[in-house]
């Protein structure tokens, strides 16, 4: 698994995969001596979370990472290139300049997270609009902001992810992205 290092060891990808292995300790013990011995073993490569980094280059597939921000420093997005095509994946983030930089030179597909607007999220989650706005503005990307990101990036195709789709969220988000 490739993933970002954290500001501290316990916030990095190695700590995450270590906890997954620990959670599977019983299963691992049952596999000892069993034909086709398996279980949860990981090989983890941590990448910088605070600067663009080259992650992978094999068989024509190139992957680079860039910092994004999701509540705490440590989240990353990725740019994947293969056979003349490129994809930029935002990761879970609020709007960041690094996404625009990752799209420079053109991108075929931009996949960016979005959350419902603060007004819609407040109603859905039973929050005050002020609290919902804190979540949207500090951790996620509003539909209006993602529409602006899509326009600036100029990708051939743009896709939303990390969005709760239902009758109350979809219509307003669609209108806000298009605006």
Image: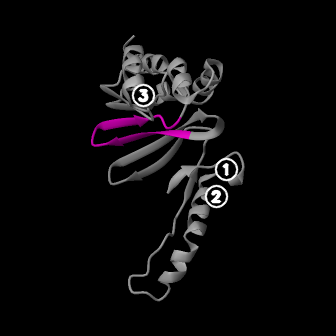
Q: Which mark is residue 15?
A: 2
The residue singled out by tag 3 in the image is: 103
Query: Camera-side residue: 5 or 71?
Result: 71
* Label 3 crowd (10 A; few <14 / some 14-19 / many >=20): many
Q: Does residue 151 show up magenta in the picture?
A: no
SS at mark 2 in the image: helix
Tell me which segment is drawn in magenta.
Answer: 76-92
Q: Residue at x 64, y 34 (%)?
A: 71
Residue 27: image x %, image y %? 51, 75
Q: Which residue does the numbered mark 1 point to in the structure image?
A: 11
Cα distance in 3D space between marks 3 and 2: 30 Å
Q: Position of residue 39 (x, y in %)?
A: 47, 73
Q: Nearer the viewer, mark 1 or mark 3?
A: 1
> Does the CB distance between marks 2 and 1 fall below 8 Å?
yes
Badges 1 and 3: C-beta atoms under 8 Å apart? Answer: no
Q: Which comes before the other along the chain, label 3 or label 2?
A: 2
């Amino acid at each position: 698994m490739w993933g970002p290092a954290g500001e501290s060891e316990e916030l990095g990808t190695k700590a995450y995969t270590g906890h997954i292995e620990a959670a599977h300790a019983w299963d691992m013990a049952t596999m000892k001596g069993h034909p086709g011995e398996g279980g949860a073993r990981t090989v983890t490569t941590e990448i910088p979370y605070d600067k663009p980094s080259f992650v992978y280059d094999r068989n024509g597939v190139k992957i680079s990472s860039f910092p994004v921000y999701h509540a705490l420093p440590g989240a990353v997005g990725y740019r994947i290139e293969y056979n003349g095509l490129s994809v930029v994946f935002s990761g879970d983030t609020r709007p960041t300049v690094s996404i625009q930089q990752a799209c420079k030179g053109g991108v075929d597909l931009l996949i960016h997270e979005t959350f419902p607007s603060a007004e819609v999220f407040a109603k859905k989650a039973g929050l005050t609009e002020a609290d919902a706005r804190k979540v949207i503005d500090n951790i996620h990307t509003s539909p209006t902001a993602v529409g602006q990101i899509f326009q600036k990036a100029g990708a051939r195709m743009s896709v939303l992810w990390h969005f709760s789709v239902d009758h109350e969220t979809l219509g307003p988000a669609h209108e806000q992205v298009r605006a």
